[in-house]
Amino acid sequence: MPTLSSRTLDTAQTRRRWLLAGLTASAAAALTACGVPIALPGKGRPASAAYERKAANHLYQRYASRIYRGKLPAMLYAVGVLEISLSGSGQIQRLNWMRKPSHAPEVVREIERLVRAAAPFPPTGVGSVSYTDTWLWDRSGRFQLDTLSEGQLEGG
């Protein structure tokens, strides 16, 4: 029976590790795309849906005059997906763009400014959390958050 050299074993193990890492990353991406929260090392635990609504309400109260009332137009100026990591006391630990509206850098800066100025957020009650919301931005500079969105008009 032939024996495998240690070099062949190392190469096979390395390939297996790379394959496993790729499969794990693909599975995590698929689950995240389906809305399943994934806790990653170094990040806060995923926030509950109740806390996401509480955080969105906090932003709506802080910026009541900036909220787009009613259904949004069919064509939005910008859509961005921002992950916010918070400490248990509601202080911002990190902002991470999951989908940045790169065609509208002024919107990116304004959203980051609004989020930072709204701190502290309500206490989480469970330690550090991360939550993601989609910012739906109208040309007027008003917005809705997907968590509390009133929907969108149909295009014609």
Image (tube, rainbow, N blue to C red):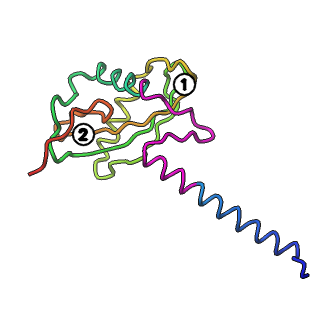
- Could you say which quadrant of the image residue 69 lies in? top left
Percent x, y for residue 58?
35, 21
Horizontal side of 155 relative to 131 (left or right) equals left
Q: Seen in the image, is 120 located left or right of residue 136? A: right
The residue drawn where x is 33% and y is 44% is: 80
Is 25 situated above or below 119? below
- Residue 149 x, y percent position in the rendering: 26, 33
Residue marked by disc 1: 87
Q: Give the image location of residue 95, x and y in percent.
A: 46, 37
Residue 137, numbered label: 2
Q: Residue furthest front?
A: 1
Residue, far left: 156
Label 2 environment density (alpha carbons within 10 Å; few <14, some 14–19, many ≥20)? many
Q: Amino acid at mark 1?
A: Ser
Residue nearest the observer in this picture, 36 or 155 = 36
The residue shown at (56%, 21%) is: 126
Which residue is at 62% across, 38% downward? 42
Q: Residue furthest bottom?
A: 2
Residue 8 vertical position relative to residue 64 in the rendered view, above or below: below
Taking the spot 49% from the left edge, 17% from the top edge, the residue there is 123
Residue 95 drawn in magenta:
no
Which range is magenta?
A: 25-50
